[in-house]
Image (cartoon, rainbow, N blue to C red):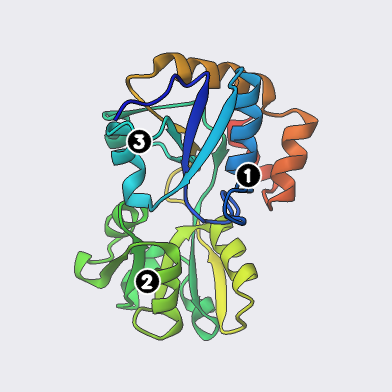
Amino acid sequence: MSLPPWRDTTIVAYLDEPPFAISRQAGERPSGCDMDVALHVLTGAGVGDIRYVRTTFDELIPGLLDQRWHLTTAIFVTDDRAEVVDFSRPIWAMTDGFIVRGHDAAGMTTYEAIAAAHATLAVVVGQVQRETAIGAGVPADRIVEFPDQEAAVEAVRRGAVDASASTAIGNRAFVDRANDSTLAAVATTSRSARAPVGAFAVGKNLPDLTAALDDVIGRYLGTPDHLALMRHYGFSDDELAPVLPG
């Protein structure tokens, strides 16, 4: 497959995962902080047309390698991923959290607590939380992978697993949207001194796109418009601070 020149038409892959990307009606642009930032940045880079493709997390990077799209919604930057794709300048930083049944919230506040409780943990295929959990002592045979967050949380809801791991802010948004009083979103503390960062992933065959993204992102982060947008989607100033200039 041959992609169109990105300045003419840029294809963005995304997940239906609030607050990062939120699907609308067919044919409408998805909302969400990543999608709104992408719109601003790509428009600022002079792109004539932006198209959006909804996919699953485990297809994001393969789709770049197969040239099905030009860039993806922001994902955590890791050394392994950076070997196969390029990353823009980071657009957010955040720690992990869990979705649990309400009565379990007090006892499942860290990966270490989940390991000590001999609890089972749901993660989305390909996301970094699996390795984080293993590093904190959760045995691999107590980690169950699911194709998306919806399926992982459903496993928590019906008692098949004890907790689902994702980003803290993403979990808050999911529970708010689910409007299910039996579920609770619990923030956890990052093991690292610095919160992991997320950035748009771009194919290594498009260094000019990455450079264009970085140029506009560098001028946009920290502006009143940017801060207002991210606060609208539930980001606190502390969660934004690691990626802001200065």
| Residue 128 appears in the picture as rendered | no
For residue 20, above or below residue 210: below
Q: Quadrant of the C terminus?
A: top right
Mark 3 or mark 1: name the one nearer the start of the chain.
1
At horizontal 64% and vertical 24% (from top left) the residue drawn is 43
Q: Foreground mark, 1 or 2?
A: 1
Q: Secondary structure at mark 3?
A: loop
Q: Is residue 35 left or right of residue 107?
A: right
Q: Position of residue 159 (x, y in %)?
A: 39, 85
At horizontal 21% and vertical 64% (from top left) the residue drawn is 140
- Residue 49 sits in which quadrant? top right
Q: Secondary structure at mark 2?
A: helix
Q: Position of residue 173 (x, y in %)?
A: 61, 62
Q: Position of residue 187 (x, y in %)?
A: 55, 62
Q: Label 3 vs label 1: CA separation?
A: 23 Å
Residue type at tag 1? Cys
Mark 1 or mark 2: name the one nearer the start of the chain.
1
Q: Which residue is mark 2?
A: 114
Q: Foreground mark, 3 or 2?
A: 3
- Residue 114 sits in which quadrant? bottom left
For residue 199, above or below residue 212: below
Q: How would you rate the neighbour count of disc 3 (Cα within 10 Å): few for under 14, some for 14-19, many for 20 or more?
A: some
Q: Which residue is mark 3?
A: 68
Residue type at tag 2? Ile
Q: Which residue is mark 1?
A: 33
